[in-house]
Image (cartoon, rainbow, N blue to C red):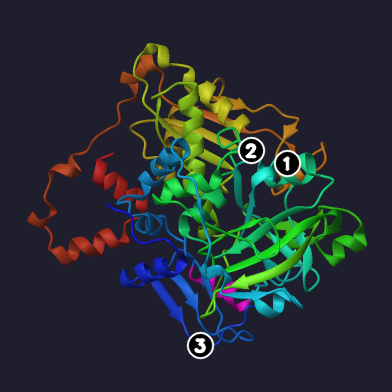
Amino acid sequence: MASSDITSIRSTLELLKREGELLTISNEVNPILEIAGIQKALEGGPAILFDNIRGYPGVRDLGNLFATRERAAKMLGIPDFKQIKFRCMDAIKKPIPPKVVEVAPCQEVVVTDNIDIFGLMPVLKHTPRDAGRIIGGGNILVTGKYVRGGSHISFNRCHFRGKDWGTIMGGPPTHLGIISYVDHRKERVYYTVNVCTPPAVMITAGGGNVHSVIPHGSDELGIAGGIQGFPVELVKAKTSDAYAIAQAEWVIEGYIDTESAWETDEAEKLGKGGEAPFFPEWPGYMGRAYRFRKFKATAVTHRKNSPIFFSPLAHSFEGEFLITHLKEACMFLVAERIIPGLVVDCNILHGFSVNGGIVYQVNKRRPWDEGYQRNILMAAMAANPGIRLVVMVDEDVDIYNADDVIWAITTRCNPVSGILSGAREGRGTLMQPLERTSGLGGGGFEGGIGIDATVPMDKKWHFERAHYPSDQIDLKKWLSDEEIKKIQASQSEYAKLMARTGG
């Protein structure tokens, strides 16, 4: 299937509208709590376009764009969402470099005087416990000398404590953290915050944090180009040597200064990081405020006609699926570099908190493959700081069904030799409460769990799955179409799997 027109978010929304995947809400909505509440209430449903935002005439907001994997596949022109990771793998291996254009839609309007971020953009307050109105959908773009000649794109939370200044989270081991605190710690770093970029750029920004596969200095925009099949367009920023995504809806130009600032007023009063509340983060817990380098906006540019803001919720299906696709590709490549061909697929299940775990499906081909699954378990835990759970199952287990994975664990994992614990006293992520509160200080790693739920090669015949002949009968001989549909509609996903496979 050829890729659809996903050169911009606008062309993408036209596609979704034709496919019945877009819900437009025209009644007035408040960016303070209401938009986030609506998005959460419609979790896993259509993309939502809010076109009547209180206090922001002529400005729209988009949410739940990536709320289903099937919709991501549709946007990329891929028949089955399970294949997205393989498109991403090809893009990592064969990136298509970005190209620079002279004129761009994102710069139809340029504001350089009296910049007021909240006055221009309908920034959300997500929950009553939030520290303020926080941008969660901006893509940070850093290029050139700051990225060792490559390009970096990522989602990073932004909180403006003043009209034109605030903080952007970016600490090691992220690439933005390396730029900010290692390579260019004592100088200003100019970059842009791009809102509502093309879908392939968002996918790359969300999932490109397995740095053992995508190291610092890579052309990450080239990966986005490879995913969409054509170059990402860039345009020179109006106030610095930085670049912006030409097809973005909004761009904040600016720099991080040599001084630092607390993310919130409360954190500043406490004088201590990791205690004051911030907003919900991807593991499902309330994030905490820290001190980062201060960001100063030098310009805001945007499209002229009805610019669209983007408001993904960090802990949501959208937050998960923004990260999942490229992340799975990276984790698959980790396995390929250990032993090619042993892993045939991988999946991040719901509840794995995206960065928290992955399931590998392996096909042991000959006796000497035995044992390599454990090498991959340990490599996966080392490759992705903060990962908590890595599971290995055989090719007869459906890795997209949590019940089937649990069945494999309970019937195939040797509790003595099949559970591997990742090394403690390494580094993890501040977003996991267990690691935030570890004895190592912020980001200490409490250890991951590797579960080998594969069948020993020499005892495989003991583990033959039962197969009832459900796939060999025609229910229409005994039931009407209406009766069949009614029963199937009441079946759980695991029941449907068992009915299909005869398991």
Residue 365: quarter of image: top left
Sequence-first disc among 2 and 3: 3
Q: In terms of sequence position, does the residue under pointer 2 or pointer 1 come before the other?
A: 1
Residue 437 part of the magenta-drawn span: no
Residue 254 visible in the shown view: yes
Looking at the picture, how far across and down is residue 332, in whole percent? 46, 34
Label pair 2/3, CB-CB below 8 angstroms: no
| Residue occupying the point 56% across, 31% down | 380
| Secondary structure state at the residue bearing disc 1 | helix
Q: Nearer the viewer, residue 164 or 137?
A: 164
Residue 121 occupies quadrant: bottom right
Name the mark on residue 216: 2
C-alpha separation, residue under disc 2 versus residue under disc 3: 45 Å
**Left or right placement of residue 424 versus residue 84 in this view:** right
Mark 2 touches mark 1? (CB < 8 Å):
yes
Residue type indicated by callout 1: Ile
In space, the residues marked 2 and 1 are separated at their CA atoms by: 8 Å
Residue 178 circle label: 1
Residue drawn at the location 39% of the way across and 40% of the way down: 86
